[in-house]
Amino acid sequence: MAKRHESLISLSGSLVDTLLQQHRHIEGLIDGMLTELGVALNKHIRLEERELFPMFERDVPEDVAVRIGEDLSRMEE
């Protein structure tokens, strides 16, 4: 019985080590994805700020812009 118990402890220790290693690997993947997401989001926002918003302000009549704003507000409700 003692040897069987020792085998279970050894196996569970190995299993725990494997699981902890997998957790660290998954955490690393998540960190990498979050970094990539942050970079992509930053690029997207800067493009909107540099190109889309100035074009909108320049080319869209004020009454149309007001209606678009109202429509967007209703969509958020």
Image (spheres, rainbow, N blue to C red):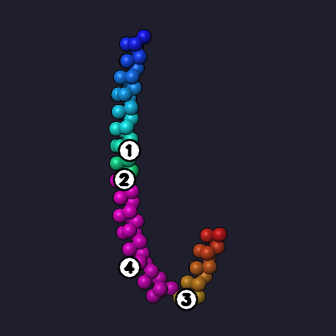
Q: Counting residues from the N terminus, which is met first, the one under dot 3 or under dot 2?
A: 2
Q: Which residue is mark 1?
A: 26
Amino acid type at image mark 1: Ile
Picture coordinates of residue 21, whole percent (x, y): 34, 38
Residue positioned most to the top: 1
Quadrant of the image occupied by residue 41: bottom left
**Residue 43, numbered circle:** none
- Mark 2 and 1 residues: CB-CB less than 8 Å, in contact? no
Q: Label 1 crowding class (10 Å Cα cut-off): few <14, some 14-19, many 20+?
A: few
- Looking at the image, residue 16 sits to the left or right of residue 63; the answer is left
Q: Label 4 crowding class (10 Å Cα cut-off): few <14, some 14-19, many 20+?
A: few
Circle 4 sits in a helix, a strand or a loop, which is it?
helix
- Mark 4 and 3 residues: CB-CB less than 8 Å, in contact? no
Q: Which residue is mark 3?
A: 62
Region rendered in magenta: 32-60
Q: Label 2 crowding class (10 Å Cα cut-off): few <14, some 14-19, many 20+?
A: few
Circle 1 sits in a helix, a strand or a loop, which is it?
helix
Q: Residue visible at 45% across and 80% down?
A: 53
Amino acid type at image mark 2: Asp
- Quick check: 14 above or below 33? above
Picture coordinates of residue 8, whole percent (x, y): 40, 20
Quarter holding the C terminus is: bottom right
Q: Counting residues from the N terminus, which is met first, the one under dot 2 or under dot 1?
A: 1
Question: How far apart, in angstroms, are the residues tagged by discs 1 and 3?
Answer: 49 Å
- Looking at the image, residue 77 sits to the left or right of residue 12; the answer is right
Picture coordinates of residue 14, whole percent (x, y): 35, 28
Q: Chief secondary structure of the magenta span? A: helix
Amino acid type at image mark 3: Glu
Q: Residue visible at 62% across and 79% down?
A: 70
